[in-house]
């Protein structure tokens, strides 16, 4: 009779202590800037030693889930991210004034819905503002003049509607844009709204958004006359002409 093999006993050593957990309020889904968080928050267990003082915990605020549902996202937030009050706009607070930097102005302007980057301009994009108006008939010119009056401007909000083309494709098209402007730029665009047949937004590349002091059409409010050149559009052909003083 063969003896059974000896049993091997493995000493696993002392067991690791259980990790202390704490319920933290987190995002259960992505929330775009300016959107209510509503049902996009939930309690989630979090290692206690990783809980930041800015986190919202069930221990400290057991009713936070219900109280914060009506809040609005001050910035874009993403699923799994712990919720922080600094990223929220409370009920009754103005969203636009909360995200506007000190010294800047929020100015709403009607834009050309059919030419503003095909409806792909979104909040936090940077754009150039192009003014188009008919050429001065008294000078004998015909067609339209176009000029970039503001450059590298941040879009705060854009009023979008759904438009369907002949092939049934749907596109979001903006009709009113709210722009972040300096007081001087706000004056420029106010004058341009009175002068222009249309204002168009041209979307800038992300790599261009760091450029500053790109110039603007301050002659519109300074009374010093037009500077530089303007583009004349006639019968579909574009040419640059010297600017009138």
Image: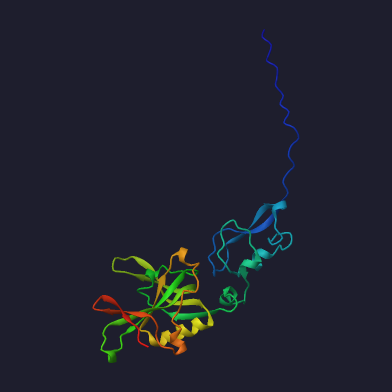
Side of 55 where 238 appears, left or right: left
Percent coordinates x, y for residue 58 in the rendering: 70, 59
Residue lying at 70% horizontally and 17% vertically, measured from the top left: 6
Q: Residue furthest top?
A: 1
**Quarter that holds the N terminus:** top right
Q: Residue furthest left?
A: 235
Residue toward you, 213 or 177: 213
Percent coordinates x, y for residue 179 in the rendering: 49, 76
Side of 225 where 79 appears, left or right: right
The answer to whether residue 68 of the structure is visible from this angle is: no
Q: Is residue 76 above or below residue 5?
A: below
Percent coordinates x, y for residue 20 in the rendering: 73, 49
Residue toward you, 13 or 225: 225
Percent coordinates x, y for residue 25 in the rendering: 65, 59
Side of 198 where 36 appears, left or right: right
Q: Quadrant of residue 17?
A: top right
**Quarter that holds the C terminus:** bottom left
Residue lying at 38% horizontally and 73% vertically, measured from the top left: 116
Residue lying at 46% horizontally and 74% vertically, measured from the top left: 214
């Amino acid at each position: 009779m063969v003896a059974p093999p000896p049993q091997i006993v493995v000493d696993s050593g002392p067991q690791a202590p259980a990790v202390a957990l704490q319920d933290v309020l987190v995002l259960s889904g992505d929330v775009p800037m300016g959107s209510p968080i509503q049902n996009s928050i939930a309690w989630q267990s979090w290692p206690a030693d990783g809980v930041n003082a800015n986190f919202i915990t069930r221990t400290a605020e057991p009713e936070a889930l219900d109280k914060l549902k009506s809040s609005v996202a001050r910035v874009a937030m993403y699923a799994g991210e712990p919720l922080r009050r600094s990223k929220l706009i409370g009920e009754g607070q103005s969203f636009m004034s909360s995200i506007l930097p000190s010294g800047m102005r929020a100015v709403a302007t009607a834009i050309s819905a059919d030419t503003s980057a095909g409806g792909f301009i979104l909040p936090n994009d940077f754009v150039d503002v192009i003014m188009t108006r008919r050429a001065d008939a008294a000078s004998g010119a015909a067609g339209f003049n176009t000029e970039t009056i503001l450059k590298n401007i941040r879009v705060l909000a854009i009023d979008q509607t759904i438009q369907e083309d002949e092939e049934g494709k749907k596109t979001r098209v903006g009709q009113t844009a709210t722009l972040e402007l300096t007081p001087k730029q706000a004056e420029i665009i106010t004058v341009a709204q009175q002068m222009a047949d249309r204002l168009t937004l041209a979307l800038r590349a992300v790599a261009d958004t760091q450029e500053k002091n790109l110039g603007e059409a301050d002659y519109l409010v300074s009374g010093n006359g037009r500077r530089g050149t303007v583009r004349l559009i006639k019968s579909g052909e574009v040419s640059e002409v010297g600017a009138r003083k």
